[in-house]
Image: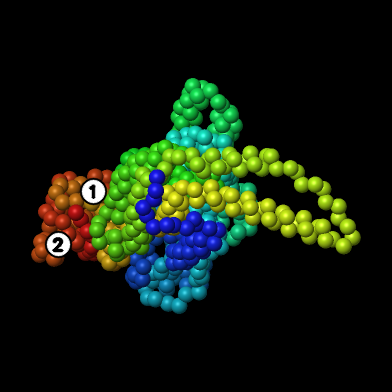
Amino acid sequence: MTATAPPLRTPTRRSLTRLLLVTVALLGALLAGAVPASAHAALTGSDPKDGAVVATAPAQVALTFSEGVALDANSIRVLDPTGKRSDTAELVNLCSGDIVKYGVRLRTGIPNGTYTVAWQAISADSHPVSGAFTFSIGAPSATAAVVPSQEVGGGLVGVLYGIARYAAYAGFVLLTGGAAFVLACWRRGATVGPVQRVVVGGWLTMTAATLAMLLLRTPYTGSGKLSDAFDLNGLRAVLETKPGAALISRLLLLGAAALFVSVLFGAYAKREDEAEKKDLTFGLAIGGTVVAAGLAATWALAEHASTGLQPGIAMPVDVLHLLAVATWLGGLTTLLVVLFRAPGIERAAVLRFSRIAFWSVAVLAATGVYQSWRQVGTWSALVDTAYGQLLLVKVALVAVLVATASVSRRWTARLSEHTAPEAEAASIVEQRAGEPEPEPVTVPDDGKDTKRAAQLARQRAAMSTAREKRIRDADPERTGLRRTVLAEAGVAVVLLAVTTVLTQTEPARTQQAVDRAKAGSQVAVADRPVDIRLPFDTGGQNGKGTVELTLDPGRTGANDLHVYLQDPAGKPKDAPEVKVAFTLAAKSVGPLPVVPDHVTTGHWSASGVQIPMAGDWQISVTVRTSEIDETTVDKNVKIG
């Protein structure tokens, strides 16, 4: 078959080097602009707020997060103006429904001034998060409190952890995609050395990266000191967490993958009977799929998909997404290696991979659309958030990759089936076998024969290289296919880097929730109860305390209202009268009064409280502690 495309030069080692340099430059630019391991749980509110000035010392400091977090007694620290802790180091769980809220109680009798709240936690999707803010009692003052300047998960440890994360993804792609290429497209590849090195290299890379992540987990989520990677107590604590369990599970599954690889390149490669080989192929395909799905699940169960909206759907979708990526990009890498190192691959094998790649891209697109909706939520978030912008970059790279793949499909369709390259390869092997062994060279004192032997060796190597080049160039369609697959691989490397950075970037939904929290006072997410907590002081004897109000489900229509009063010690507190009013100033609605019924000590409730429309409502709570001592506290919340 004669090629009608313009003549193409076979990619040389120089062109490969140029592609590698361009890829490294793109990766460097990408990773240099990426934020260091930003976590996916975010602080959406606090009581007191950042920068607030309160008249009297609150009973506690409370933090509200966008998703579940892991905390301990030292996760929230309140530092007084001298830098000493003013909290009791007792974590208080204030979660209610879908509201994730924790706090610490403050010591009694603390002085006026500016207080610093430093906090650190691990989000439900395994990423560390930290931050700090200030509030003042009475009036602002100078403060000597010092908080860590480096964000948790950053620094050298953060860089190393990010590299290990990328290596784990890359190893999974090579291991899964290379094995799938052999079983589904080119069974003869099980006996080909370069193919074996791709799959085994993927297994080694993934195993080493998983071990590195396990050791780096302690400093990554804690001190940030590389020396803590070998802290046995820290490692023991990591193993008790969800990310630690996922990494250990991955190591166990890699043990099963090692057995799979040994059978694939051992008994399977040596099997000659076609019927027996067909049965073994089926068994390896089933076993390999189970192991690959298990490896993919170690990401799905511990990261993005395990938290947020619809985790029951998101986790299996994430597994399918990872398997589709690995099948496509891992098979592509294996094909590239075969085209350069073992040019005798049959046209039928390339066509089979082309079909598999097509369906992998289809699955990738379908699962990617769902994941994008789940993490982004709105069209504006695509351009207004870092996550959305990275997602657009990823979509653009996938489009480039698909366009390049379409060119490869055209070359594949024109790929000739003649066996001239293989026949020439066999003749070269026979020719080499018939060549006489070189006679031993006696090395005299002057060393001239040594130089002659070295020159002959270089000539033989040059002739061998020329023969191999002649084999590769014997079919121009294969030459064109090698070039387009090489370009695909270069884009795929950058695409994998973007995906890795994307998994470390705060989802757009979370970022927008944080932005709304900063713009307003209280975030009330649709279908989540409104939960507010306010200090009050009626000015009379025993007139201080805290009022906590819950409006469930926190949307338009009928709601259940609960009001709780606590004294400064946190114990239930009664009062002669408690009233609530709702006002929507933007629509000139209200105040709508509600007089809840007294249920028990410190608890009032009312059912069927109607919120007529969505908007930013002001909730006012009036507390009367005596005949003349009364006060009203209020807070703005978004309902509906």
Q: Which residue is mark 2?
A: 584
- Which comes sooner in the sequence, label 1 or label 2? 1
Q: Residue at x 61, y 52 (%)?
A: 465
Horizontal side, residue 36 vs residue 318: left or right = right
Q: Residue at x 35, y 56 (%)?
A: 400
Figure quadrant of residue 379: bottom left
Figure quadrant of residue 631: bottom left
Q: Secondary structure at mark 1?
A: loop
Q: Position of residue 471 (x, y in %)?
A: 53, 47
Question: How many discs appear?
Answer: 2
Instruction: Say which of marks 1 and 2 sits in front.
Output: 1
**Amino acid type of the residue that numbered disc 1 sits on in the rendered structure:** Asp
What is the CA distance from the residue labelled 1 to the residue labelled 2?
Answer: 19 Å
Regarding residue 78, the answer to whether it shows in the image is no
Q: Position of residue 129 (x, y in %)?
A: 44, 58
Q: Residue 527 shows which numbered tag?
A: 1
Mark 1 closeness class: few <14, some 14–19, many ≥20 residues within 10 Å: some
Q: Residue 171 shows which numbered tag?
A: none
Q: Quadrant of the N terminus?
A: top left
Q: Position of residue 164 (x, y in %)?
A: 53, 53
Q: Residue at x 66, y 43 (%)?
A: 432
